[in-house]
């Protein structure tokens, strides 16, 4: 990686607007949101329910294109309004890692296979994928449950497997939507610290939607959303 | 890592049950094809086995397998005089249904041209060929008559002296070989009263003619056996079978015989073709229709189950799309399940058939080209059946993951 690349921001979102529905069911979920996240930066996104946090996260995650605005990831224009400028699926596979409130593991695959599948769809050989998946589970402390189906894992264990899956392809951008909602505060904090570690060690950008004010000290920056509008949050909120 | 197999392991009951159902349906499809082949085999078996070069049948008929063919028995003498002809035999064949030991007994009575033909060409599984001109028969095993069994047909009793296997007529009824005269006796058996009435009627007819009035001696003849009456037709047979001399040109001999206006000539192949295009053809179309319907039903069942299996994992498919899986991965998942179901069902059908087909009432002949063709059809319907599931999987949006 050369220096020029290191200075390109991980995400540049320009004037994102999202309108759901039309006529009298129209909802403006995101109004002219612009955001810039540097590499290695860990960002928290706060805000009341219905503020548009998930809408912003999924827009940047390239699974819910905005009505207007542009998204650059790693210096590359990937979405211009709802027009894809790259193969979005390939882009997600190679550069993005997702964690959601629910673990969303595939129920017919064991813990290790759930991680392995993310590697295999990105062209890793089954053998290499298996080894790497085991390493990740080990890193997240669930290696002992590697061969269990998701049903046999606790919510926290499932969520850690999901995090392992999100990290599998060493994404340059990790998007997490309330990843710790199903965890106790200790485990929740561990996951947040893990994101911060990955960001600082590997230079990945991390964007986390959270309601958990106790872990906010882990983040480099905090933004707040309300009624579809984004603004940097007050330092006082971050301190509590 | 194979997603299709892992998903099936997770849904093993539903998958297995459907596969068994498909397997049974395919077994019937396979069996019906086999029955059709069996029909052809059985229909042409006799024509092949009697080994005639030419068939002489009643003029402008299609021969004894297609309709009633009647020609005088003495036509064989006329045929023998034609250059190139080595031999001529009478062919008598008709199906009867009588009663034996309180059970219906349905058989094809087949006349052997005794004494030249004793049935030595019939492959026996037990007993021997015919040894006397009357009251013996060789029966197919399917008739259920044991060796030594006495069967009363008409006024006479016949003994089973030999047993064959797999010799059945085009209707699937077992063959029984008699001498021609016995076969005709069985066919034309009339009760004594009918004979008496016929003789009385002859006498009355004669007395009404001036011939009867001027030759009273004749009236003694007409009340006697029919074969003493020169004015009555000789007995009728179904066909005369011609064997050619070595090196004789069948076309030439056929052309010579064809100039006779009272008969029609067929080669063995033509006789077989007539058989197949006639009754077997209807059975073929009927069986074919059932097979097509069953294949369509199999395809629909497969499509439905693959669709529900896909619906069950639509959330997982959305997730795979979300984490960036190519469409190939998702299509492969569904297609592999479809093909696996088809291949397993086909294998099961074949395996079950090994046990079931020999127990079918009709002969089932399974031929490799038919198996290959059905295999191809199964692959095709498997792929077709997966389309509905694939279409559903392709239309799901990755952000569906979040909608749960
Ligand atoms: N698919 C959709 N169709 C119509 N409206 C939608 C859709 N998704 C979200 N909305 C609306 O857009 C607004 C923002 O929703 P969003 O899910 O982004 O909020 P959020 O900040 O993530 O809330 P929460 O904290 O409850 O998850 C809401 O008013 C919501 O009702
Ligand atoms: Mg949300």
Image (spheres, rainbow, N blue to C red):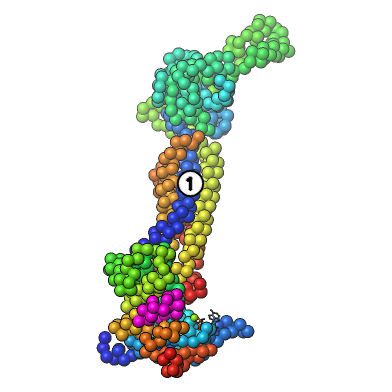
According to the picture, the residue beneath numbered tag 1 turns out to be B24
In the rendered view, would you say B329 is above or below B113?
below
**Magenta extent:** A172-193
Query: At which x and y percent is residue A110?
Result: 37, 64
- Vertical placement of B19 versus B61: above or below? below
B285 vs A23, nearest the viewer: A23
Q: For mark 1, name the chain.
A: B
Q: How crowded is mark 1: few (under 14 residues within 10 Å), some or many (20 or more)?
A: many
Q: Where is residue B198 in the image (x, y as percent from the top left)?
A: 67, 15
Between A224 and B267, which is closer to the camera in this rendering? Answer: A224
- Please report the residue visible at 43 percent of the width from the left and 70 percent of the height from the top: A155
Quadrant, the N terminus of chain A: bottom left
Indicate the secondary structure of the residue bearing disc 1: helix
Asked if residue A111 shows in the view, the reply is: yes
B86 or B167: nearer the eye? B167
- Where is residue B64 shown, x and y percent of the image? 54, 30
Q: Quadrant of the C terminus of chain A?
A: bottom left
């Amino acid at each position: 990686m050369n220096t020029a690349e290191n200075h390109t921001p991980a995400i540049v979102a320009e004037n994102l607007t999202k309108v759901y529905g039309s006529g009298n069911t129209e909802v403006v979920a995101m109004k002219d949101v612009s955001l810039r996240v540097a590499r290695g930066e860990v960002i928290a996104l706060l805000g009341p329910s219905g503020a548009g946090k998930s809408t912003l996260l999924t827009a940047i995650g390239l699974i819910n294109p905005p009505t207007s605005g542009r998204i650059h990831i790693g210096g590359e224009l990937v979405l211009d309004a709802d027009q894809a400028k790259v193969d979005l699926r390939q882009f997600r596979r190679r550069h993005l890692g997702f964690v959601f409130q629910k673990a969303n593991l595939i129920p017919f695959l064991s813990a290790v296979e759930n991680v392995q599948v993310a590697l295999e769809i990105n062209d890793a050989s089954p053998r290499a994928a298996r080894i790497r998946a085991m390493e990740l589970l080990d890193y997240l402390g669930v290696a002992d449950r590697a061969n269990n189906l998701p049903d046999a894992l606790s919510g926290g264990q499932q969520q850690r497997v999901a995090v392992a899956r999100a990290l599998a392809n060493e994404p340059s951008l990790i998007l997490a939507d309330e990843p710790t909602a199903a965890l106790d505060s200790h485990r929740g904090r561990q996951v947040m610290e893990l994101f911060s570690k990955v960001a600082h060690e590997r230079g990945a950008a991390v964007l986390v939607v959270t309601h958990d004010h106790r872990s906010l000290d882990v983040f480099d920056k905090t933004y707040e959303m309300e009624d579809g509008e984004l603004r940097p949050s007050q330092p006082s909120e971050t301190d509590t | 890592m194979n997603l299709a197999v892992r998903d099936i392991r997770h849904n093993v009951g539903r998958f297995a049950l459907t596969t068994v159902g498909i397997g049974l349906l395919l077994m019937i499809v396979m069996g019906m094809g086999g029955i059709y082949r069996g029909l052809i085999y059985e229909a042409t078996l006799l024509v092949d086995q009697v080994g005639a070069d030419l068939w002489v049948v009643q003029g402008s008929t299609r021969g004894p397998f297609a309709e009633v063919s009647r020609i005088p028995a003495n036509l064989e003498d006329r045929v023998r005089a034609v250059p190139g002809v080595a031999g001529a035999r009478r062919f008598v064949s008709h199906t009867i249904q009588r009663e034996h030991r309180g059970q219906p007994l349905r058989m094809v009575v087949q006349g052997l041209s005794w004494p030249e033909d004793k049935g030595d060409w019939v492959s026996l599984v037990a007993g021997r060929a015919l040894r006397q001109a009357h009251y013996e028969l060789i029966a197919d095993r399917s008739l259920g008559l044991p060796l030594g069994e006495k069967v009363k047909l008409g006024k006479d009793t016949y003994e089973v002296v030999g047993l064959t296997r797999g010799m059945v007529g085009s209707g699937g009824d077992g063959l029984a070989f008699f001498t021609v005269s016995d076969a005709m006796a069985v066919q034309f058996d009339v009760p004594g009263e009918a004979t008496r009435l016929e003789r009385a009627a002859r006498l009355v007819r004669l007395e009404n003619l001036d011939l009867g009035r001027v030759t009273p001696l004749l009236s003694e003849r007409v009340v006697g056996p029919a074969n003493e009456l020169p004015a009555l037709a000789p007995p009728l047979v179904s066909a005369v079978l011609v064997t050619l001399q070595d090196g004789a040109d069948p076309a030439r001999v056929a052309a010579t015989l064809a100039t006779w206006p009272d008969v029609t000539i067929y080669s063995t192949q033509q006789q077989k073709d007539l058989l197949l295009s006639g009754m077997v053809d209807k059975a073929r179309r009927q069986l074919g229709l059932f097979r097509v319907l069953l294949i369509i039903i199999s395809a629909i069942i497969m499509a439905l189950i693959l669709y529900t299996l896909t619906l069950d994992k639509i959330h997982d498919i959305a997730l795979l799309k979300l984490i960036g899986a190519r469409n190939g991965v998702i299509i492969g998942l569904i297609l592999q399940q479809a093909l696996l179901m088809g291949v397993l069902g086909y294998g099961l059908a074949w395996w079950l058939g090994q046990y079931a087909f020999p127990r079918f009432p009709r002969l089932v002949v399974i031929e490799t080209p038919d198996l290959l063709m059905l295999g191809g059809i199964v692959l095709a319907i498997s792929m077709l059946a997966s389309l509905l599931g694939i279409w559903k999987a392709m239309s799901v949006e990755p952000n569906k993951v979040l909608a749960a």
